[in-house]
Amino acid sequence: MKADKEKIFILMANKCMEVKDLEVQSHMPRSTLNKVLAGKRVRPVTLGKVAKALNVDVENIIERR
């Protein structure tokens, strides 16, 4: 699965979060979070952690084709 990085950055802006804040809230290494933010394929559980940290459903951050 791929994340829509624009959606993630908009959600982060709405919550006044920086990447470091998202890293802490999602409980994942910065390198994994960088993959998500770069729009690379990641495991569904990884996107689940990001969505949970942003307090949204996964459907709100995945890239639609």
Image: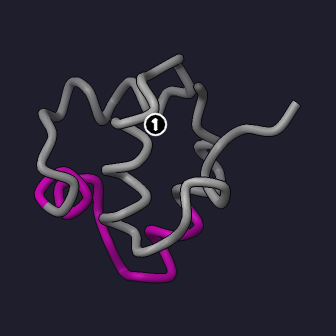
- Judge whether residue 15 is colored magenta: yes
Q: Residue at x 28, y 53 (%)?
A: 19
36 on left or right of 20: right
Q: Residue at x 51, y 71 (%)?
A: 56
In the rendered structure, which amino acid carries the disc numbered 1?
Leu
Q: Nearer the viewer, residue 51 or 23?
A: 51
Q: Which residue is mark 1?
A: 37
Point out the stretch of residues depicted in magenta. Answer: 10-24
Q: Nearer the viewer, residue 50 or 11?
A: 50
> Most extreme residue toward the bottom, as rendered?
15
> Most extreme residue toward the right, as rendered?
65
Above or below for 30 versus 27: above
Residue 59 in percent (x, y) is at 66, 55
Residue 60 in percent (x, y) is at 65, 60
Q: Residue at x 33, y 30 (%)?
A: 34
Applied colour scheme: one colour
Magenta part, dominant SS: helix
Residue 2 in percent (x, y) is at 60, 28
Residue 54 in percent (x, y) is at 39, 69
Q: Residue at x 44, y 68 (%)?
A: 12
Write down the quadrant of residue 51 in the picture. Answer: bottom left
Above or below for 39 versus 40: below
15 on left or right of 2: left
All told, the count of numbered labels is: 1
Provide the secondary structure element on which disc 1 rests. Answer: helix
Write down the quadrant of residue 24 in the picture. Answer: bottom left
Point out the image quarter for the C terminus. top right
Point out the image quarter for the N terminus. top right
11 on left or right of 17: right
49 on left or right of 21: right
